[in-house]
């Protein structure tokens, strides 16, 4: 069963090898992500916690942290919130992302500041596009990202 567990700074420290983990949780082979990405997500989540009361979760399946998901920033004045998610390389293609986005949408539905949920996927990331489609998102356009190149923008009413 895949569940979301609120991610705290101490959890990122653990995933980066800087401290102990939570009792009952383990990391997958190879970790959740590479240290550079984890450090970036940790910093983003720190800013998010300072500006909003929710938004960063670990994706946990049977006691193993298989990925991360959450808001990329707090909802804007129009109630739009962009989400992001990632699953450990050793745990992909098992449905974790789809179940995590479903649970994330449940959390967004409880956020009074969020009215519209958006996401961005690399055009070549078909698996992530399928995850969003399975969760009811609709394509709203194409854009460009310096890291990912061409990207697809997605939207869903919260």
Image (tube, helix red, strand yellow):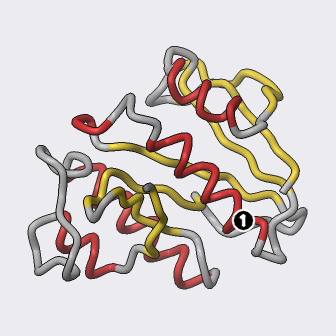
**Measured from the top left, where is residue 129 in percent x and y?**
61, 26
* 116 is higher (above) or lower (below) than 111: above
What residue would you read off at disc 1? 108
Nearest the viewer among 17 and 130 is 130
Nearest the viewer among 62 and 98 is 62
Number of numbered discs visible in the structure rendering: 1
Specify the quadrant that holds the C terminus: bottom right
- Residue positioned most to the top: 124
Quarter location, residue 76: bottom right
Quarter location, residue 119: top right
* 8 is higher (above) or lower (below) than 134: below
**Kind of element beneath mark 1:** helix
At 73% from the left and 21% from the top, the residue drawn is: 142
At 47% from the left and 63% from the top, the residue drawn is: 3
At 75% from the left and 66% from the top, the residue drawn is: 75
The answer to whether 133 appears left or right of 69 in the picture is right
* 98 is higher (above) or lower (below) than 27: above
Specify the quadrant that holds the N terminus: bottom left
The answer to whether 82 appears left or right of 40 in the picture is right
At 29% from the left and 59% from the top, the residue drawn is: 65
The answer to whether 52 appears left or right of 63 in the picture is right
**Measured from the top left, where is residue 136 in percent x and y?**
78, 37
**Measured from the top left, where is residue 48 in percent x and y?**
55, 74
**Measured from the top left, where is residue 79 in percent x and y?**
85, 64
> How many C-alpha atoms fall within 10 Å of the one at disc 1: few (<14), some, or many (≥20)?
many
């Amino acid at each position: 069963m895949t569940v979301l567990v609120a991610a705290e700074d101490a959890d990122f420290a653990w995933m980066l090898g800087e401290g102990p983990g939570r009792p009952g949780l383990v990391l997958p082979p190879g970790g959740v992500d590479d240290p550079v990405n984890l450090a970036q997500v940790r910093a983003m989540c720190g800013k998010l916690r300072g500006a909003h009361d929710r938004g960063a979760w670990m994706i946990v399946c049977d006691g193993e942290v298989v990925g991360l998901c959450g808001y990329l920033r707090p909802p804007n004045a129009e109630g739009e919130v962009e989400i992001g998610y990632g699953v450990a390389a050793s745990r992909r293609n098992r449905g974790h992302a789809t179940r995590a986005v479903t649970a994330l949408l449940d959390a967004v539905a409880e956020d009074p500041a969020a009215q519209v949920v958006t996401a961005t996927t690399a055009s070549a990331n078909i698996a992530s596009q399928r995850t969003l489609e399975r969760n009811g998102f609709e394509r709203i356009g194409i854009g460009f990202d310096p890291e990912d190149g061409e990207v697809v923008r997605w939207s869903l009413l919260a």
